[in-house]
Image (tube, rainbow, N blue to C red):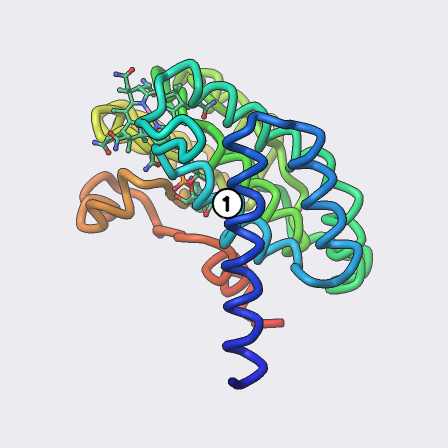
């Protein structure tokens, strides 16, 4: 086995171990497990987010209860994973400083349209922007259109990230993107409109049709925005 297949197998094992703790709805065990792997260098932040936490959140079957998750269980799991993310903040910031020092690549505002209540992916994307050296304002779920425009005008971001999970919310996303484009040409604001989330990933042809500048799928795409790969 090569070093990289060893690492992949190790991460798969960490995923299973994390899932067992998540299925048991044991917040403390989930947090301690994640922090211990980061402390030991067995996982880095990106591996933890994209190969452990995100797939665990997407998994809709509870092996302990042997059935599909109910909505209340999805809420519980989302909340546990969010706690894990928040406890990883010191690691995230340390890793950012090691990669980019104290430089800032500009501000990013991350929003979800009205009625979009899935916000964990948006939150992870916000953290991954932070890791890549951006200053991030995470607004999150269910944000009214005018509020997004107000934030854009006040904060002068380099990027506005619109996250959509439920395809029904693509219509609201279209309205937001159109409105942001109008504001951009009227005011000369320099922000780019980037989009992400499962709805866009499933329908990438809509990215241009809706008027967005770019689809970003995760860390590698965010890193490439700055024009370099670390
Ligand atoms: C948790 C969950 C919920 C929770 C959300 C809680 C919360 N606070 O976020 C609750 C219970 C509220 C919920 C509600 C609903 N849900 Co739901 N939910 C899920 C579930 C299980 C996990 C979503 C998640 O957190 N994923 C983990 C994150 C980390 O992954 P991600 O979203 O893919 O994000 C990654 C990338 O996409 C990217 N990314 C995301 N956004 C952005 C933005 C930018 C700028 C960038 C760069 C990157 C980026 O980065 C992330 C990290 O890699 C999914 C199942 C699944 N397969 O995903 C269903 C799922 C998304 N839900 C679904 C549905 C249907 C609903 C409801 C309509 C159900 C109902 N009948 O009530 C409602 C709709 C609510 C609404 N109006 O928004 C469907 C969507 C179906 C479809 N057509 O695609 C899914 C796929 C389940 C299914 N298979 O049917 N849900």
- Image side of residue 152 versus residue 115, left or right: right
Q: Residue visible at 69% across and 44% down?
A: 33
The C terminus lies in quadrant: bottom right
Q: Secondary structure at mark 1?
A: loop
| Residue 1 image position (x, y, % from top left) | 51, 85
Q: Which residue is mark 1?
A: 190
- Give above or below for 177 relative to 37: above
**Does mark 1 have its CB less than 8 Å from ligand 1?**
no
Foreground residue, 149 or 162? 162
Q: Visible in this render: residue 153? A: no
Foreground residue, 66 or 144? 66
Q: Residue visible at 65% across and 36% down?
A: 30
Q: Residue visible at 58% across and 36% down?
A: 21
| Residue 229 image position (x, y, % from top left) | 57, 72
Label 1 crowd (10 A; few <14 / some 14-19 / many >=20): few
Q: Residue visible at 53% across and 43% down?
A: 53
| Residue 23 image position (x, y, % from top left) | 50, 31
| Residue 103 image position (x, y, % from top left) | 76, 57
Q: How many marks?
A: 1
Q: Quadrant of ligand 1?
A: top left
Q: Visible in this render: residue 168? A: yes
Farthest residue, direction bottom: 2
Foreground residue, 206 or 58? 58
Corner quadrant of residue 18: top right
- Give above or below for 124 relative to 113: below
Foreground residue, 11 or 135? 11
């Amino acid at each position: 086995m090569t070093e990289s297949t060893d690492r992949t197998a190790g991460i798969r094992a960490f995923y299973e171990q994390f899932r067992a703790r998540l299925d048991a709805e044991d917040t403390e065990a989930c947090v301690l497990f994640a922090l211990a792997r980061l402390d030991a260098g067995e996982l880095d932040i990106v591996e933890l987010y994209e190969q452990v936490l995100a797939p665990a959140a997407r998994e809709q079957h509870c092996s302990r209860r042997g059935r599909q998750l109910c909505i209340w269980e999805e809420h519980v799991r989302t909340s546990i994973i969010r706690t894990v993310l928040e406890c990883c903040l010191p690691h995230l910031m340390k890793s950012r400083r090691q990669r980019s020092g104290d430089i800032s690549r500009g501000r990013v505002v991350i929003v979800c349209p009205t009625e979009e209540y899935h916000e964990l992916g948006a939150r992870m994307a916000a953290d991954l922007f932070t890791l890549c050296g951006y200053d991030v304002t995470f607004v999150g779920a269910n944000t009214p259109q005018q509020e997004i425009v107000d934030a854009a005008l006040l904060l002068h971001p380099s990027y506005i990230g619109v996250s959509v999970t439920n395809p029904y919310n693509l219509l609201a996303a279209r309205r937001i993107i159109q409105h942001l484009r109008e504001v951009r040409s009227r005011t000369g604001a320099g922000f780019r409109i980037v989009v992400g989330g499962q709805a866009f990933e499933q329908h990438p042809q809509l990215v241009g049709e809706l008027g967005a500048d770019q689809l970003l799928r995760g860390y590698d795409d965010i890193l490439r925005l700055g024009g370099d790969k670390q």
